[in-house]
């Protein structure tokens, strides 16, 4: 490229890190070169200086300096036969506009350093009428459950707007240590990303915080069942902050089982899988074509299914959220 250009962040790119966005669109730019551009202010987002890990928002403009003339668009990889078969088995609902998948625990949604297998790389197997499905939201790698992808660009735009506009109601199931008091309520606790001291140094964590960088976070919760030292909790994130449910559960003294990062030793329960026990059970959202509200759910699987069987928790329970909870 011979001159400076500006690109807008697309709806299906919202939440993507800047360095990953560059890797997708300009694979010839090495990470070290990108860091140099950022230090000099040659790459900017929304007119300001940013870091490589900056999360992008739909519609933001990215300033791109002159780059080499190498190919600028990275073609999505073609899934191998095993990945293609695997992603088809994850489908719990599909129509001409969207696909609902039951993401397994441990499967990353997008690629990154040392992440070769990820959901985004498998979506090519679901291509229809020449259009590759697009991500419109994300789940953490260690969280399982329902994830929605758009079949068309128009559906991606409308679904992306619904997620950004908080027009999507999500219900998560979690196994937590202890029993919350009261049994239902709303956690209103601002959080922010901060460097936190740990045993072997420092790492970035989301923590309860105050100040300009703190963002308000709201989580509704209700106790479904309890079994001695653990509880089956339903959680509804009103806001969509990173690691919000995990931080809020730990803050009220009932960390999610398997969440050593935020719950520490209290998140370890003898006889229960050490993996994170957090699952996106259902979503209610407007259909991208008709606008009518629809609710989709995913059946519990993996280690959480085994845990629910162990404690004889009801896997068919329908969670009802009181209108006057907040």
Image (spheres, rainbow, N blue to C red):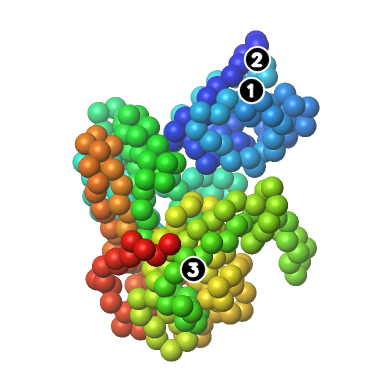
Which quarter of the figure is the C terminus placed in? bottom left
- Mark on residue 63? 1
Which quarter of the figure is the N terminus placed in? top right
Tell me which residue sits at (50%, 82%) in the image: 178
Tell me which residue sits at (75%, 27%) in the image: 41
Looking at the image, can residue 102 be seen? no
Dividing the picture into quadrants, the one containing residue 203 is bottom right
Spatial separation of the CA atoms under disc 1 and disc 3: 39 Å
- Mark on residue 276? 3
From the viewer's side, name the closer residue of 232 and 42: 232
Q: Position of residue 4 (x, y in %)?
A: 65, 15
From the viewer's side, name the closer residue of 160 and 217: 217
Dots 1, 2 in contact, CB < 8 A: yes
Please rate how many residues cluster around mark 3, counting C-alpha atoms within 10 Å: few if below 14, some from 14 to 19, many from 20.
many
Tell me which residue sits at (54%, 61%) in the image: 188
Q: Where is residue 84 in the image (x, y as percent from the top left)?
A: 33, 46
Spatial separation of the CA atoms under disc 1 and disc 2: 7 Å
Check disc 1 and report its element: helix, strand or loop.
strand
From the image, tell me which residue sits under label 2.
4
Looking at the image, can residue 202 be seen? yes
Extreme-bottom residue of the structure: 228
Task: Please say if 228 is above or below 219.
Answer: below
From the viewer's side, name the closer residue of 90 and 263: 263
Task: Please say if 235 is above or below 35.
Answer: below
Check disc 3 and report its element: helix, strand or loop.
loop
């Amino acid at each position: 490229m011979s001159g400076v250009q500006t690109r807008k962040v697309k709806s299906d790119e919202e939440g993507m890190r800047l360095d990953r966005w560059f890797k997708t669109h300009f694979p010839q730019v090495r990470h070290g070169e990108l860091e140099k551009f950022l230090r000099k202010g040659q790459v900017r987002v929304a007119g300001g200086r940013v870091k490589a890990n900056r999360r992008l928002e739909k519609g933001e403009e990215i300033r791109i300096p002159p780059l080499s003339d190498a190919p600028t668009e990275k073609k999505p990889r073609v899934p191998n036969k095993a990945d293609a078969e695997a992603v088809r088995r994850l489908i719990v609902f599909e129509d001409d506009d969207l696909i609902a998948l039951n993401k397994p625990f441990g499967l990353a949604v997008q690629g990154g350093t040392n992440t070769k297998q990820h959901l985004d790389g498998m979506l090519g197997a679901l291509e229809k009428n020449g259009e590759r499905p697009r991500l419109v939201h994300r789940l953490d790698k260690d969280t399982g459950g329902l994830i929605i992808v758009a079949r068309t660009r128009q559906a991606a735009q409308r679904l992306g707007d619904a997620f950004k506009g908080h027009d999507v109601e999500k219900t998560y199931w979690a196994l937590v240590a202890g029993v919350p008091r009261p049994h239902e309520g709303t956690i209103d606790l601002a959080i922010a990303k901060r460097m936190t001291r740990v045993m072997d140094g420092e790492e970035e964590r989301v923590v309860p915080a105050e100040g300009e960088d703190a963002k308000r976070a709201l989580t509704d919760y209700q106790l479904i069942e309890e079994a001695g030292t653990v509880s089956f909790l339903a959680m509804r994130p009103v806001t969509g902050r990173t690691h919000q449910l995990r931080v809020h559960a730990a803050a009220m003294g009932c960390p999610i089982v398997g969440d050593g990062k935020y719950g520490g030793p209290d998140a370890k329960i003898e006889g229960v899988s050490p993996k994170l026990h957090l699952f996106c059970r259902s979503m209610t959202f407007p259909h991208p074509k008709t606008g009518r509200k629809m609710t989709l759910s995913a059946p519990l699987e993996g280690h959480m299914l085994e845990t629910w069987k162990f404690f004889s928790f009801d896997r068919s329970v329908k969670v009802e959220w009181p209108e006057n909870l907040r």
